[in-house]
Image: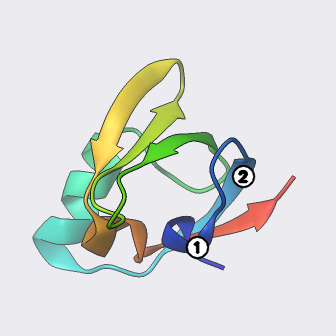
Amino acid sequence: MTLKETPVHQTVKVRGLSGEGPVKRRIMDMGITRGVEIHVRKKAPLGDPIEVTVRGYELSLRKADAEMIEVEQI
């Protein structure tokens, strides 16, 4: 399952990142790495952006970036 498919108000744990190069680096710079818990707070009507809480910080992710984050339910 990817972060894009995660329902709103659910907390998930990151299993891995499937992006490469600068895209993967941008995601990791946000503090999203393997084992981190992410809480999905809100999704825009068309799914872009997705607002999440990571390590106490509130972030907005693009739909394309959320597809590259593999997650599992806690």
Q: Which mark is residue 12?
A: 2
Q: Residue furthest left?
A: 22
Relative side of 45 to 36, left or right? left
Q: Which residue appears at 51% of the width and 33% of the height?
A: 54
- The answer to which quarter of the image holds residue 59 is top left
Who's the residue at 51% across and 31% down the image?
A: 53
Mark 1 vs mark 2, foreground winner is 1
Residue 55 lies, in percent from the top left, at 54, 25
Q: Vertically, is 16 above or below 19?
A: above
Give the x, y percent position of residue 68: 40, 76
SS category of the residue bearing label 2: strand
Q: Secondary structure at mark 1?
A: helix
Disc marking residue 59? none
Which residue matches tag 1? 5
Side of 38 where 26 appears, left or right: left
- The three-letter amino acid code for the residue at tag 1 is Glu
**Relative to 44, 12 lies left or right:** right
The residue carrying pointer 2 sits among few (fewer than 14), some (14 to 19) or many (20 or more) residues within 10 Å by Cα, namely many
Residue 30, above or below 68: above
Which of the marked residues, 1 or 2, is nearer the chain's N terminus? 1
Residue sitting at 63 percent across and 64 percent down? 6
Query: In this rendering, is residue 19 above or below 71?
Result: below
